[in-house]
Image (spheres, rainbow, N blue to C red):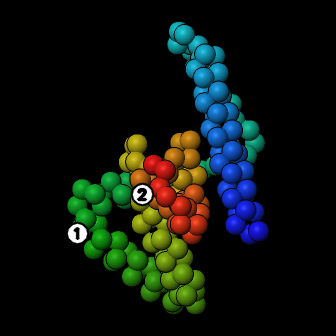
Amino acid sequence: MSTSRLNKVQEQLQEFRRRREAELEAQKAKEAAAAPKEPSQPEAPTFSRVDYFAIDVLNIYPLRKWREWCNFDPWRCWIATFCFWAAGQMLFISAGFGIVYFMFSLLMAMFLNLGSRKEGEMSAYSVFNPNCERLLGQMTSEHFERDMMMQAKTN
């Protein structure tokens, strides 16, 4: 009884996937047919009220210049950065805010070391990639289902 129910669920899942793939293919064909033939002028960007608060903190002028200097001459940059940090730490300790300065320093160090992806490089998280593309070899729920149900590989 349970194997027939499992087979029925598997068939329904396969049918759902086939329908979804067909819908995606139809949508891609529709978008390709609706695409303009000649390039048009790009529209001017529109900003909402929320967009004014969308600031790239790592791209503000002082941090951008610091990163450029760090890429150009890393040893001098880190030595100067440490000297300025130590002087600031001493000033804040004398003012009674040493732990606040230290915690803020840790937060800044985290932000400065986040890094950035190169143009065209994919994220490890598929939701951040164009069209939610997965990385090659990434484990998905389909792979998990196949392995748990011991099905033969279809691809």
Q: Position of residue 124 (x, y in %)?
A: 47, 58
Q: Amino acid at mark 1?
A: Trp
Q: Position of residue 57 (x, y in %)?
A: 54, 56
Side (left or right) of 9 relative to 81: right
What residue is shown at x 35% (from left), y 71% (from top)? 81
* Numbered disc 1: secondary structure: helix
Q: Which mark is residue 75?
A: 1
What residue is shown at x 56% (from left), y 41% (from top)? 131
Q: From the viewer's perspective, is residue 32 above or below residue 108?
A: above
What residue is shown at x 40% (from left), y 42% (from top)? 120
Question: Spatial distance from mark 2 to mark 1, Cα to Cα?
Answer: 38 Å
How many numbered discs, if any?
Answer: 2
Q: Position of residue 45 (x, y in %)?
A: 63, 29
Q: Name the quarter where the N terminus is drawn.
A: bottom right
Disc 1: CA contacts within 10 A as few (<14), some (14-19) or many (>=20): few
Q: Which residue is mark 2?
A: 137
* Numbered disc 2: secondary structure: loop
Q: Amino acid at mark 2?
A: Gly
Where residue 37 sits, quadrant-wise, is: top right
Q: Which mark is residue 124?
A: none
Check the image and name the residue furthest to the top: 38
